[in-house]
Amino acid sequence: MTREAIAPLPKPENSKGKPRRTGVEIEFAGLTEERIARIAADALDGKAERVEGNDWKVSGTKIGDLQIYLDIFLRKEADNALKEFGLRIGREVIPVEIVTDPLPREGLLQLSDFIELLRSEGAEGTGRSPLYGFGLHLNIEIASDEAEDIVRPLLAFALIEEWMRSTWPIEMTRELLPFTAPYPRKLIADLMTLGPDATLERAIATYRKHTLSRNHGLDMLPIFCELRPDLIDPKEGKGGTVSPRPAFHFRLPDCRIDDPNWSLDSEWRRWWLVEKIAADRELLDRLSHEWRAAKGGFHPFGDKWVETCDGILKETGLLEAARA
């Protein structure tokens, strides 16, 4: 991992002038929770301890505390007998998950080095088995609670999500799971109508009108519930409990941890691209105009939006930067 990795976002600081932080959730197989905890404690100078059942915590590391557990809904919801059954069968198809504290750029670089160490120790990603459908989630702190710092990244993601899914296809197993459904087309269209200068209240009302699901590539409910709990209650979220926080919950990245050509940086660049588009008002307007043109009318052989979007991003140089 080079020091040029984890490129700074267009707005690298929050409203208090401090570096924006990103929490990371990594899903993979091939190693037990205890083994991962021991590796982390040795590599990151922390203390590993079992906290409950097979759940582990590594505290006081160079990148803060790490939570390590089998990522299965049965862990906390089911009775003991059903939970134990789920854990036994789950190890064949359900990943272990590492959850980090919010990290600045230097912490993300250190985490990336740790991920490479896990690869060398036998960690397995989505490509290892047709039953695997693992992801890597990024929780990127918002630049501020101003509307443009929330609405424009949302609009940018909505515009390029279809292209992103075509450019970086989701593993079949993960696509079948109800965790990363694409945004409804009507939501995207209404966000286009609102435009990049929409108020936060109107954006929330539009989002809520079309979906309250947490299971999207970009889950906006944590931000909306944090900033305007009077407009969306955390209990209304469908597909998991909403933990209000001022961070974009980006669920579309992949985890191919056993692939030497894959890295945390390759997934970070997906979100970096979203924010680069969001920061360019002229590009946002152009993409919006072309999206409407592509999606309007009758297209018997497809609407060609992916190809159009790809061409625009190549022209701007952003495509090459995102794939570097």
Image (cartoon, rainbow, N blue to C red):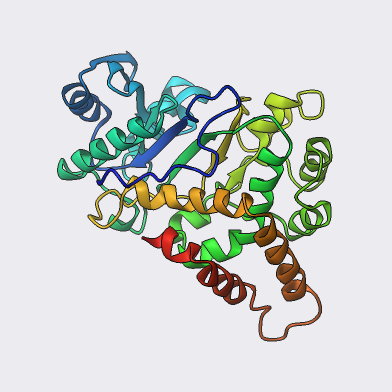
Q: How many marks?
A: 0
| Residue 35 visible in rendering | yes
Can residue 133 be seen here?
A: no
Residue drawn at (22%, 55%), measured in percent from left and top? 260
220 in relation to 174, above or below: above
Q: Nearer the viewer, residue 76 or 182?
A: 182
Whole-percent x, y for residue 207 in the image: 76, 44
Residue 18's spot in the image, x, y percent? 50, 24
Q: Which residue is at a point 25% across and 55% down the rendered structure image?
A: 259
Q: Is residue 181 left or right of residue 66?
A: right
Q: Front-most of 110 and 224?
A: 110
- Is residue 315 toward the left or the right of residue 95 in the image? right
Using the image as rendered, state which of residue 297 and residue 210 is in the foreground. Answer: 297
Q: Residue at x 81, y 39 (%)?
A: 199
Q: Is 50 situated left or right of 75 in this image?
A: left
Residue 72 occupies quadrant = top left
Name which quarter of the figure residue 304 lies in.
bottom right
Query: Residue 100 location in percent, x, y?
Result: 39, 27
- Quadrant showing the C terminus: bottom left
